[in-house]
Image (cartoon, helix red, strand yellow):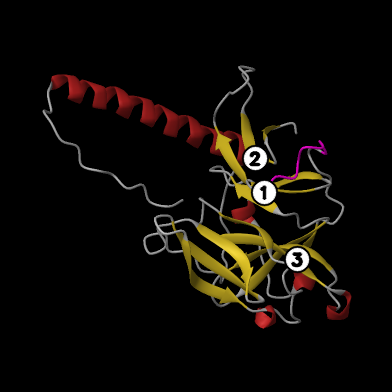
């Protein structure tokens, strides 16, 4: 999602170097082609119109994290060299009407399909919209996509546009999240509160996820995506296929 910094090399640029570049270029193009085919044949990704703005990754070219800081939800940028954070924008509870529950925003990820920030949050009983929701967020608006069983604590979005999130009860997925309509009123969101997890394995509650697409880690020949997370001292891997 964030730009790759390319460093200029030094030394002689002979025929061997050009040959290596051709091989690397061929491998890269093959990988890109395979992943594009995965998108077209497996996930059928498309985008929908939304008032939510994309994250500008040319400006925010460092790791971003959504956290509650001084009792306010904030999107913050990490400077790895110093370990310090700076605030990109805030998300006050009254950004929604009625307000969402303080401290409930979690399971956030930027979608590589549309560069929009997706998260989950909670509405309480007093709001008349009680439940947990997947939302789109920017520096001025929040839009509701779907009401879900659990908002979870960790999420990732694959290069094919699948939104994965997890809680102690399991791991869920929602394909083509960029193509789902979203609304300023939670009552208009799609009701997926009965959505079943694709796995309820006990090791499904990591601090965070990353997703690999278009790879075959177990040599099964399956078209699959793999979620990789860290829970305590264990690295866990979940495999998602078209049938799961």
Q: Position of residue 60 (x, y in %)?
A: 42, 62
For the point 56% across and 60% down, the residue is 65
189 displayed left or right of 226: right
For the point 83% across and 49% down, the residue is 195
Q: Position of residue 244 (x, y in %)?
A: 75, 34
State the SS at label 3: loop
Residue under label 2: 229
Residue under label 3: 189
Res. 76 mark: none
Q: Position of residue 156 (x, y in %)?
A: 62, 48
Task: Tell whether position 205 is magenta.
Answer: yes
Question: Earlier along the polypeptide chain: callout 1 or callout 2?
Answer: 1
* Highlighted magenta segment, given as a residue range: 200-206
Q: Quadrant of residue 220?
A: top right
Task: Tell whether position 162 is magenta.
Answer: no
Q: Is residue 124 visible?
A: yes
Compute the Cα span from label 2 to label 3.
29 Å
Question: Earlier along the polypeptide chain: callout 2 or callout 3?
Answer: 3
Kindly check if marks 1 and 2 are in contact, taking CB atoms under 8 A apart as contact.
yes
For the point 64% across and 37% down, the residue is 227
Residue under label 1: 207
Q: Is residue 116 visible?
A: no
Q: Quadrant of residue 151?
A: bottom right
Q: Is residue 83 above or below residue 11?
A: below
Q: Is residue 86 above or below residue 225?
A: below
227 displayed left or right of 131: left
238 displayed left or right of 5: right
């Amino acid at each position: 999602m964030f730009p790759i910094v390319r460093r200029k090399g030094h030394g002689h640029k002979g025929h061997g170097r050009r040959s290596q570049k051709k091989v690397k270029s061929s491998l890269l193009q093959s990988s890109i082609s395979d992943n594009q085919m995965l998108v077209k044949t497996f996930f059928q990704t498309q985008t929908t119109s939304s008032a939510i703005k994309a994250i500008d990754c040319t400006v925010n070219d460092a790791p971003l994290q959504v956290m509650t800081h001084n009792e306010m939800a904030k999107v913050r940028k990490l400077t790895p060299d110093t370990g310090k954070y700076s605030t990109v924008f805030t998300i006050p509870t009254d950004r929604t009407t009625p307000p969402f529950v303080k401290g409930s925003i979690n399971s956030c990820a930027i979608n590589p399909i549309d560069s929009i920030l997706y998260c989950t949050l909670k509405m309480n009983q007093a709001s008349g919209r009680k439940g947990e929701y997947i939302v789109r967020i920017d520096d001025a608006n929040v839009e509701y996509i779907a009401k879900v069983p659990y908002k979870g604590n960790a999420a990732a979005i694959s290069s094919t546009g699948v939104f994965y999130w997890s809680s102690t009860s399991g791991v869920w997925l929602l394909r083509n999240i960029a193509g789902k309509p979203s609304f300023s009123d939670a009552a208009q969101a799609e009701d997926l509160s009965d959505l079943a997890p694709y796995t309820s394995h006990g090791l499904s509650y990591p601090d965070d996820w990353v997703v690999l697409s278009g790879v075959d880690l177990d040599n099964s020949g399956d078209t699959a995506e793999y979620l990789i997370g860290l829970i305590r001292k264990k690295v866990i891997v979940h495999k998602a296929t078209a049938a799961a």
